Image: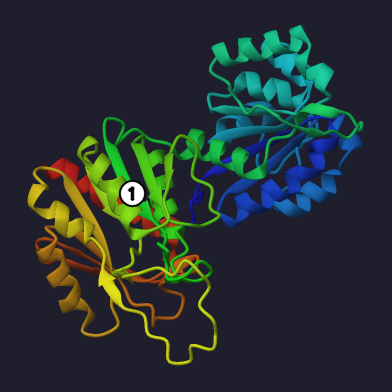
Amino acid sequence: MPRFANKKILIGVSGGIAAYKVGEIIRELKKEGATCRVVMTSAAQKFMTPLTFKTLSEAPVLIDLFLDDPEFNIVHIDAARWADGILICPASANLIGKIANGIADDLLTTLVMATKAPVLLCPAMNTQMYLNPVVQANLKKLIQFNYQIIEPTAGELACKEEGIGRLAEKSTILNALKKIVLGTSELKDKKILITAGRTEEAWDVARILTNRSSGKMGFALAEAAALKGAKVGLISGPNQLIPFPEVELIRVTTAAEMAEAVLQRWHQYDILIMAAAVADFRPRTVSTHKIKKAHAQLSIELEPTTDILAELAPQKGEKIFIGFAVETDNIIESAKQKLKQKNLDLIVLNNPLEPGAGFATDTNKVFLIDRTGTIDALPLMPKSVLAERIIERVIEFINVL
């Protein structure tokens, strides 16, 4: 199931040039399975047409308090009850002031007054407007009333000025929306340490030995755990991925650095998930110069790296350990051996020869094998969804303890 499957998101658009960015947010939400309805103020319609958002949301746009709508009889009440979450993007100074002071003089403000759903506001405006003490006071008031605010960023504005007031990045807005709509508290008292990505081992000043891991699985696990309320530490090898908000990110490069980071921290956590593809070997020596191509018969002497889980297995105690295995031959038996040798509660088995599975993809197809020998063969699915399945198994383990 997509992340926002069965979730209903109401998107309020007020007057501002940043209204054109809302289309991309709707597209992302639809990709994730959300049902979206858009509410536009009269000022918003000066910047974007209702037809644009009707096309993107695949639903009529709500523009008037007394509009006849096939889904909502009393529009402001029924739409307020319908929503699992309300995103107001962009939120103008005028709209912020009205909501903060209980003014309900159009469909969007009336609907906000009538809802019990969480409301996320994304201010976007000129710097001086945003910094105006009245606007700041209104934002503080809204926070006291449990509204969620995503602060704007700094940069060049539509008026050509430089300063704070730009609409927050799409990823920031979507992550905040995930927290208010999808966030739960099953793991609120738990700490989870996750490793992600590849490691890189130099053999001269210009070249490295590495693997194909992108880090996407580990970052998806960190997000899924954070959404369940866990405090998450994420130790990652080299990549360009951005962690979910509130996840503590520790960057490393080599297998030795990965081992050091894990061994220093693991005792502070309740659960360890080793999703990283840590190099098994590294060059015994590293050249301080670039090795010339003329060395046609070059050979590199390798030495083993630290097997992190093997080091920790005897000290596991009551902690939950989850590992990953990449196998292409005799895959089930090989994974079971690793499960036993490394004292794991669960091993996630990948076969990179399967289409859409393994490294550098957004999907995966795995077997979940637990310490009782139970094997779950999961179909091809997005890594974000697989991460949720794995975290659900973690919760099951906790409930059994």
Question: Which residue is label 1 attached to?
Answer: 194
Residue 83's x, y, as percent? 57, 35
Q: Residues within 10 Å of mark 1 (few under 14, many from 20)?
A: many
Q: Quadrant of residue 390?
A: bottom left
Q: Is residue 344 visible?
A: no
Q: Position of residue 173 (x, y in %)?
A: 62, 38
Q: Secondary structure at mark 1?
A: strand
> Is residue 383 shown above or below 17?
below
Q: Nearer the viewer, residue 223 or 146?
A: 223
Can residue 299 be seen from the camera position used here? yes
- Horizontally, residue 355 falls left or right of residue 278, namely right
**Residue 353 in the figure: left or right of residue 390:** right
Reply above or below: 117 against 299.
Answer: above
Q: Looking at the rendering, in which quadrant would you find the C terminus?
A: top left
In the figure, residue 162 lies in which quadrant?
top right
Q: Nearer the viewer, residue 308 or 273?
A: 308
Residue in the image at 10% along x and 65% along y: 340
